[in-house]
Image (cartoon, rainbow, N blue to C red):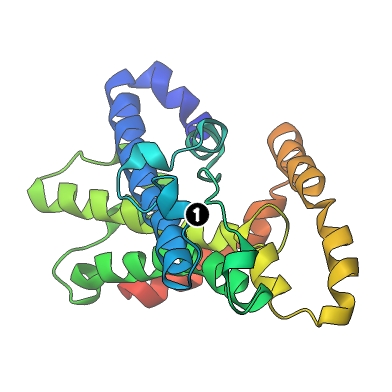
Amino acid sequence: MLLGSFQLLQDDPSSFVRLAVLIAFSLVTAVTVHEFSHALVATGLGDNTARSLGRLSLNPKRHLDPSGTIMILAAGFGWGKPVPVDPKQLSRGHTDTALVAAAGPLSNLIVAFLLAIPFKAGLLVPAGLSLDRVAYVMTGGLSDGIADILALLIFFNLLLGIFNLIPLAPLDGSRVMAGFVPSEHFAAYSKVQRNGPALLVAIVMLDCALGLGILWTVIGPILRTLTTLATGY
């Protein structure tokens, strides 16, 4: 995200700083909601591990992962500090683990749709949702400024939710899918997922180094569809 706006730093430093601050705020909000929801559902299903470690909290400091935060700021996608889950404390094993995993992405989607209500109702016009205008947020009046802030919050909540549903470890999607894998095939599935982090890193590196846009090819159409459904634009 900010890597793509590096030219803005040279041309208009104040706009770059404004963009960085708003992206950081949106990121912190989305990650906090995401990780808190993991902890909340895990606690509700009987696993007190997250609560005992202080993760059942809306304090952003409890949930931010340095490398994941840098990735979102720099490249537009990333992650928070994983919420620890003890399957032995969950009564339904892989099924409950899948529910805990799904809670994070689903919470981001729910928050995005709630924040989009003013746009859906026609009270605000989401000019900031256009990705080619994202560098020019907060350049209009009060209503435009509110619209830009909400637009970035919606964007990052949708982005974080969609990205984490990719079925590759260590992302939530791998654990969600695990809940649907028959027990006789679970060992084979787990073996495949052990290569997930390496594959994910390889895709990210190829995207950054060669500009292939592999992740955006997957995420982009879903993001645009959900944005339209949420805002009506």
Q: Secondary structure at mark 1?
A: helix
Label 1 is placed on what type of residue? Thr
Quadrant of the frame with the C terminus: bottom left
Rendering coords of residue 77 (x, y %): 55, 46
Tell me if I can see residue 233 in this picture.
Answer: no
Could you say which quadrant of the image residue 123 lies in? Answer: bottom left
Would you say 13 lies left or right of 37 here?
A: left
- Residue depicted at x 33% and y 65%: 111
Rendering coords of residue 221 (x, y %): 58, 67
**Residue at mark 1:** 49
- Residue depicted at x 88% and y 77%: 185
- In the rendered image, the vertical position of residue 156 relative to residue 18, given as above or below: below
- Residue depicted at x 49% and y 72%: 225
- Residue depicted at x 30% and y 38%: 22
Would you say 55 lies left or right of 187 here?
A: left
Rendering coords of residue 107 (x, y %): 40, 66
